[in-house]
Amino acid sequence: MYSVLNITDDITHCGNIGHVVNDFTTICNLAHQYDFKGINIDFRYLNSLSLPEGKELLERLNLKPVAFDFPVKLFADQQEFEQSLSEFESVAKKAHEIGCQLTLCYLPPFSNDLNFNDRFIQTSNRLKQLKYILKRYEIKIGFEFIGPTETRRNTKYDFIHTIDGTRALIASAELYGYGGFKLDVHHWQNSGASLLDLHHLDLEYILYLELNDGLAGYDIFTIPEFKRELPYQTGVTNVKDFLTLLYEKGYQGPVVVEPWNQTIKNMSLDKAIQTVKNSLDYCLAFN
């Protein structure tokens, strides 16, 4: 397992630590300075660098290009979805050229327009249309399901929010080997899953890990989705057994923290990055 710096996402999106840097060179230098092994990439912010120059910078600083944003409008109307396919192919080509082989896709756990059956069929059919791009550019999709009930309690329909639901979608879309998990310990535990679910999860599915800790005083039906702590801070989330089992399965891939934490957001960028790196080092030292 290796540490990844993710400061490319806006605070309203997944994977963030509350800070955003919109310059590839700066991100690379910060990752190198604080001894991260990889970074996530937003191809909009290469700025003046060409792809070969970006690849050379990564190689010079010994950084892995880990994951890029998923530009497909998977849950939009048909026209928007179809228009986004060409953008995905363009970004996938860039990712292939720079050596990045993973894109990350959030699965909304609810729908207000289609019931579960219709949303599942639509999503599966759309994902099938991506397979030729994934094969051509050697890209995999890491799907993130959302476990806690908070985000679907007041919606008209629910959608995939478990390990089994995500595996079923991958199977239906014929993406085994090209689709897997962006596996967040918070969503794993608060979906009602157990260590046994991880034990039976094929290693090939596990593409990317996110770590954090839950707030005390809640159960899996009431725990908030967007308020968390760094891992090992409260002991609410079973981070140690989660990591130990995945390590014993042979997982050697990227790990980030996603604390959704106001205290870290209020820190200076450098202090936030150092705090996150210290947390990741502590987590990974167990394995």
Image (spheres, rainbow, N blue to C red):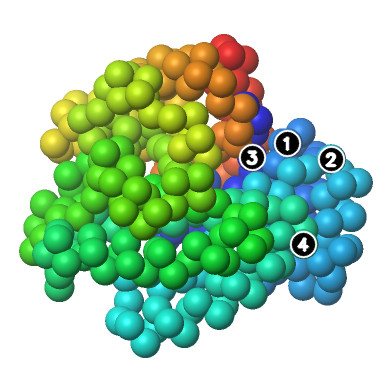
Mark number displayed over residue 203: none
Marks 3,1: beta carbons within 8 A: yes
Mark 2 surroundings: few (<14), some (14-19) or many (≥20) residues within 10 A: some
**Residue at the disc numbered 2:** 62
Give the structural element (helix, strand or loop) at label 1: loop
Q: Give the residue at x 57% y 34%.
A: 255
- Alpha carbon distance from label 1 to label 4: 19 Å
The correct choice, above or below, for 48 with respect to 23 in the image is below
- Where does the C terminus fall, quadrant-wise? top right
Marks 1,2: beta carbons within 8 A: yes
Query: Where on the picture, by quarter, is residue 13?
Result: bottom left
Mark before the other along the chain sequence, 1 or 4? 1
Marks 4,2: beta carbons within 8 A: no
Q: Give the residue at x 61% y 27%.
A: 252
**Residue at the disc numbered 4:** 97
- Where does the N terminus fall, quadrant-wise? top right
Mark before the other along the chain sequence, 3 or 4? 3
**Residue at the disc numbered 1:** 37
Which of these two is toward me, 191 or 260? 191
The correct choice, above or below, for 152 with respect to 196 in the image is below
Query: Where on the picture, by quarter, is residue 273?
Result: top right
Q: Is residue 195 left or right of residue 140?
A: left
Give the structural element (helix, strand or loop) at label 4: helix
- Alpha carbon distance from label 1 to label 2: 7 Å
Q: Give the residue at x 36% y 57%.
A: 173
**Residue at the disc numbered 3:** 4
Q: Is residue 108 left or right of residue 219?
A: right
Mark before the other along the chain sequence, 1 or 2? 1
Mark before the other along the chain sequence, 3 or 2? 3
Which of these two is toward me, 117 or 223? 117
Give the structural element (helix, strand or loop) at label 3: strand
